[in-house]
Image: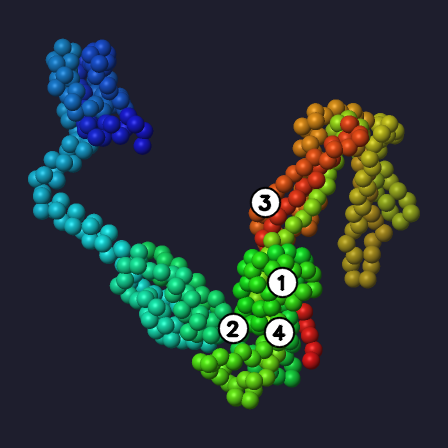
Amino acid sequence: MPVFSLVSYLMGYVVILVKGKSPEKFINLAFSNGIVLWDITSISKDKLLLKVRLSAVRTLRQVARKTHCRFWIQKRTGAPFLYSRIKRRKSMALGIVIFVLGLYFLSSFIWLIEVTGNHYYSSGEVLGVAAGAGLKQGILKKQLKAKKIEKVIQNRLPEISWVGITVKGTKVSVEIVEKAQVKKEKNDIHTHVIAKKTGIIKEILVINGQATVQEEDTVVPGQILISGIVLPVKKADETIEKGRTAEEAEKPLYVHAKGIVRALVWYNGYGEAYLKETGQRYTGRIAARLSLKIGSEELKIINSPDIPFSKYKKEVTRKKMPSWRNFKPPVELIKQKYYELESYERVLSREDARQKARQKAWVKIKKQVPEQAVIIRQETDEIAGNKEELVRIRMLIETKEDIGIEKVFYF
C-alpha cells in the first residue's frame, strides 16, 4: 500500500458528490486552500465525484459556499470510522479479539500426527514409540524435540533406516524409510552399492544392506559403499528378525543392496580465448536453387546461374514423394541454399577474453556434472603463460551428488 493511501486510511477519508454550476471553481479553490483531493471523476457537467480526508471536510464546506456548490458524503472509509463502529459494538469487538487469541493459542499445539512410508511396521507401532519419546497430540510445538524423537524411533524399531519429522501448522508428519525385507530365493539378484567416482562422503541413507563407509570418508571408484552381505551383529537385547530362525540369524544375509550415498565431488574445466579473433561469419545474404529430379533428369525450377558469393556454406535438402505399396515414385525435390560468409577480425579486451574462456571451461564441466548434482562451490583461476595474446582459465566446481551405483555379485 502506498504511503499516501496508508496515511489517508489511518486519518480517515470520505467520498463526496459535488454539484454546482462551476464544479471546476470548487476544485481550484480547494487546492488553493491546501486541501488535497484525489480520484476526481466527472459524472456530468455539473457533478463531480472525489475523495478527501476527513479533517478537511469542515474547510471544504466554506469552499462550497464561496463557489455556490453543494456536496454530499457518499461513503466513509478509514480507521476513525472503523473505531466508531467497534465502539458501538463492544461485545462484538471483544468476541473477535477472544476468537483471534484463541486461534493463536490453539495453533501453538500439535493436534494431528501422521505416519508415511511404513510397510513393515504399522502406524500404531510407530506412533506408540513416538509417544514414548514425547510426540503426542496436545503438546506444545516449542516442546517438540524432533531430532531426539527421530533417534528414539530408529533405535526402538531396527527395521527403520531413516526417520524425518516435519511440522506444518498443527500437523506433524513422521516420514520413515524401512529396510527392505528380502527373502532368499533362487532368482534373487544380489548387489552391492559401489562408488562410481572419487569423493568425500557427506550423507548415507541405507534402504537395504549394510553400510561399509562413514561420513567424511574418502572413497574411490569401485569401492563398496553399501554391502549386499549383511553380517550378523549380536547384542544383549538383540531380537531375531521376523521370518528368520535362530540358526539363520547367525549366518550372513545376502540382499539386493539399496541406498543413497551423497558425496562431495570435484570437476575441472579448461578454456582459452585469444585477444585477437579471426574467422568467418554469416552475412545474412542467401541464394537458393530449387529443382525437380525425375529419374535421371533434373528440371530447374528456381535457378541462380552463378553463385553470387565468393565464400559461402552450402546446404542441400532432398524431399522424396511417399511410396505407395511397393512402388517408389522416382521423383525428388532438391533445394540448395548458399549462405554467404565473410572474414572478420575482432580485438577483445582482456576481461572479454576471460569471460569467453570461462564460458568454454564451464561448457566442458557441464558435460560431466549430473543434472541432480547440487553445486556447492566454484573457483576460477587464470593461468599465467608466455603468450600475452592468449587468456587461459581453469575452473573448479565442487558438487554434492549421489555417487552410488549397483553392482551384482555372486557367492
Give residue 23's quadrant in the image.
top left
Residue at x 51%, y 85% (from the top left corner): 243
Mark 2 — residue? 179
Q: Nearer the viewer, residue 127 or 247?
A: 247
The answer to whether marks 4 and 2 mark residues whose Cβ atoms lie closer than 8 Å is: no
Give residue 209's quadrant in the image.
bottom right
Which dot, 3 or 1, sits closer to the camera? 3
Q: CA distance from mark 4 to mark 2?
A: 12 Å
Mark 3 — residue? 377
Q: CA distance from mark 4 to mark 3?
A: 34 Å
Question: The C terminus lies in which quarter of the figure?
Answer: bottom right
Q: Secondary structure at mark 2?
A: loop
* Drawn side of residue 311 relative to residue 144, left or right: right
Q: Earlier in the sequence, mark 3 or mark 2?
A: 2
Q: Earlier in the sequence, mark 4 or mark 2?
A: 2
Q: CA distance from mark 3 to mark 1?
A: 21 Å
Q: Nearer the viewer, residue 35 or 247?
A: 247
In this view, 343 is above or below 159: above
Amino acid carrying label 1: it is Gly
Q: Earlier in the sequence, mark 4 or mark 3?
A: 4
Amino acid carrying label 2: it is Lys
In this view, 148 is above or below 93: below
Mark 4 — residue? 228
* Drawn side of residue 304 relative to residue 204, left or right: right
Mark 1 — residue? 404
